[in-house]
Amino acid sequence: MEKSLSLLRHKKIASKPLLLDLSLPKDRDRFETLVVEGEVRQISDDFEEEQRELFGIRNPSRVYAPGFEEEFKKYYKSLSQEKPLWEHGRWAYFSWRYLAAHILPEEEYRLVRTARNQNLITKEEQEKFYNATIGIAGLSVGSSVAFAIALGGGGKRMKLADMDRLALSNTNRILAGADRLGMLKVEMAARTIYEINPYAELELHPEGLTSENIEAFFEGLDIVVDEIDNLAVKYLIREQAKKRKIAVVMAADNGDNAVVDVERYDLDPQPEFFHGRMGEVSYEMLKGLDKFGIGKMITKHVGPENVTERMQQSLTEMGKTIVSWPQLGGAAMVNGAAVAYCVRKILNRQPLESNRALVSLDEKLVPDYHAPEAVAHRQQISADFARGFGL
């Protein structure tokens, strides 16, 4: 048993789908080999429904008119008369699932998948969003950002950087389950993105971002999302963004809420890094901080007044009653949606907050949040918290 488990543990499985066109003899042979060797154990073939949706999207005035189904059946029959239906479209083989899915060609697949975005996102906006190259550094909250971008039909090309592996304690906020524990986070995220869009083009950096590879990571980027914990590397990200004149979007979860920061190096040639909230900093200074110094600097950046009461209480209990600072899955999703929104707006050169926005569920949903007593209480505990950090 130990030998069997060891062999399975070390089996390498690609995290990128294989796209096959079964009208081509070489691809058909490859597919048949995969079936014979037991690498394809199930298929997902909803091609008729995909074609029905495509037909409706291309003929919207007919969808609710009498005879639509008959017209579609006639169209679908004509496809089968051209060549066998299994030769139409593409087959995406997901090796990690031992599954092959019958899907439309890329442009038709994208048209159907984003049809319900219209007209909330215009065709022109969707094109810019899809064809952008987006860098995402850090795949805890960053994975929620990546998934939200992919769901919205954005970022065919993404560069993902993270050196960590998925741990069980991560799964309260990362959309991944027990089947991906121990996997590199870049691989974990890539699989989900490819399952959303098999035509995606992803560049993975499992070594994370470093001073050695950051130039290569930024090459060709249109925008970058910063969700890493390392403050010194955050500084390097802003150096590169300023040099290349691209925007940086960052979000931090704060209890159930989000703190979203936007730095428009694409617009302002001389903005202060982190909007000056950390004061005068350098790469070497940030690199040399101890754990307390890092915590103090992060608190300074977020602002003690913005840290929720329970988060404040939790930070003082680290190493005593809890292991690390708490984070919630709902907050990760709020952050993901907010950053994806910012990315889409920036890529389309639309008006957007260029500094900071607080996305607070507490403010919107907690009764009497703005009552004078509640405001005074938050101000008092924030002042006490700031003093505790020497701010």
Image: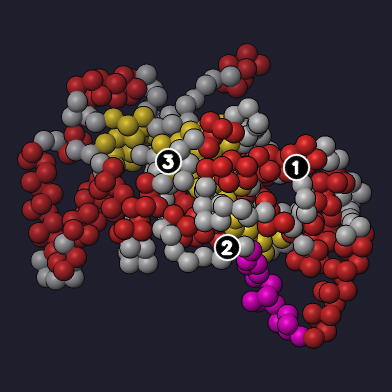
Residue under numbered circle 2: 354
Report the front residue among 285 and 361: 285
Do we see residue 164 in this rendering? yes
Residue 292 appears left or right of 21? right
Residue range (magenta): 356-371
Mark 3–mark 1 Cα distance, whole angstroms, equals 31 Å
x and y percent of residue 293 in the render?
86, 46
In the image, residue 329 lies at what x, y percent? Answer: 64, 55
Q: From the viewer's perspective, is residue 70 above or below residue 160?
A: below
Secondary structure under the numbered disc 2 in the rendered image: loop
Instruction: Identify the element where label 3 is drawn.
Output: strand
Q: Quadrant of residue 22?
A: top left
> Observer-nearest residue: 96 or 361?
361
Residue 282 numbered mark, or none: 1
Asked whether, in this view, residue 75 is left or right of residue 228, the answer is left
Residue displayed at 76% across by 85% down? 371
Q: Mark 3 or mark 2, which is nearer the start of the sequence?
A: 3
On residue 391, the disc is none
Q: Which mark is residue 157?
A: 3
What is the spatial separation of the Cα atoms under label 2 and label 1, in whole angstroms? 23 Å
Name the residue at 53% across, 31% down: 216
Mark 2 or mark 1, whichever is nearer to me: 1
**Disc 3 to disc 1: CB gap under 8 Å:** no
Residue nearest the observer in this picture, 184 or 118: 118
**What residue sits 41% from the left and 58% below the top?**
348
Q: Position of residue 300 (x, y in %)?
A: 80, 57
The amino acid type, in three-letter code, at marker 2 is Ser
Q: Is residue 377 above or below residue 158?
A: below
